[in-house]
Structures are given as structure tokens and as C-alpha cells.
Amino acid sequence: MYAKTNPSAGRLSPQQKRAFTIIGVLVVLILAGLGIWSALASDSYSSSGHGCVNVTVPSSTGGATVHYCGAQARSFCQTSFQKQDQLSLRARPQCVLAGLAPSASASASG
């Protein structure tokens, strides 16, 4: 009823339309930029390699990442090739990717 008595009510001025358009475009550009960044950014826990081991294991909250580098990674991998539990079995391929698998001579002598 109010719109009938005041015809300009509810209409946006050209300046308001321009402001809403600019804000809308900025929001879309920011969201697109965040999407592209999240898709292309490297993740330090994404894969094993260069002496670091990353293993994703089932957890009560969905999944957990086990991450070790250096001496901790060597110890973890050595233990994973000696045990038969689920974590050790999941860790072995990642230890191989990281270059921390036991050598053939060490496994033949041990």
C-alpha cells in the first residue's frame, strides 16, 4: 500500500545500483580467487617425499594425518617395516615414496 502512495519507494537510484553491482562483482572475484588458490596451492602434507612421511589414517573424527621428517621419519619407517599393525601397513608405501624403505642388503641380513 505504501508503494502506491509513494511511487519512488523501493526503487534504487543509479548510484545505489552501481554500488550494489560493484560490491557483488568484488564478492564474486574474491570467492573465485579463494577457490583458485585453494585448488592450486601446494600442501606440505599432501604427499610423502624428500625424507618426510605423511600417512592418513582412520580416526574417530574422520581421518588424521601422521607427519614425520628427518630422524623421526627414519625411525617411524624402520618400525613400520617391522610391525604388522594397520598404521604400519599404511605407512610402508609412503616410506617408499619418501625414500626411507629398508635397503635390500639390510633386509637380507636381518
Image: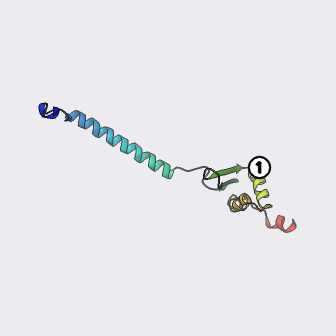
Q: Secondary structure at mark 1?
A: helix
Q: Report whether 16 appears left or right of 95.
A: left
Which residue is more in the foreground, 32 or 9? Answer: 9
**What colour scheme has been applied to the protein in the rendered image?**
rainbow
Residue type at tag 1: Ala
Which residue lies at the image location 28% right of the left edge and 37% below the top edge?
A: 20
Q: Residue at x 82, y 66 (%)?
A: 107
Figure check: 12 above or below 86 = above
Specify whether 87 is left or right of 43.
Answer: right
Image coords of residue 23 (percent x, y): 32, 38
Q: Is residue 38 left or right of residue 26?
A: right
Position of residue 74 relative to residue 21, above or below, is below
Front residue of 60/71: it is 60
How many badges with numbers are in the image?
Answer: 1
x and y, in percent, of residue 66 in the image: 68, 51
Q: Quadrant of residue 18?
A: top left
Question: Residue 81 at x, y = what percent?
Answer: 78, 61
Name of the residue lying farthest toward the right: 109
Task: Identify whether 100 is placed above or below 3.
Answer: below
Can you say which quadrant of the picture contains the N terminus? top left
Mark 1, other Cα within 10 Å: few <14 / some 14–19 / many ≥20? few
Residue pushed farthest front? 1
Q: Residue at x 68, y 50 (%)?
A: 67
Residue depicted at 42% across the width and 46% down the height: 33
Q: Which residue is mark 1?
A: 71
Residue occupying the far bottom of the picture? 108
**Placement of the C terminus among the 4 image quadrants:** bottom right
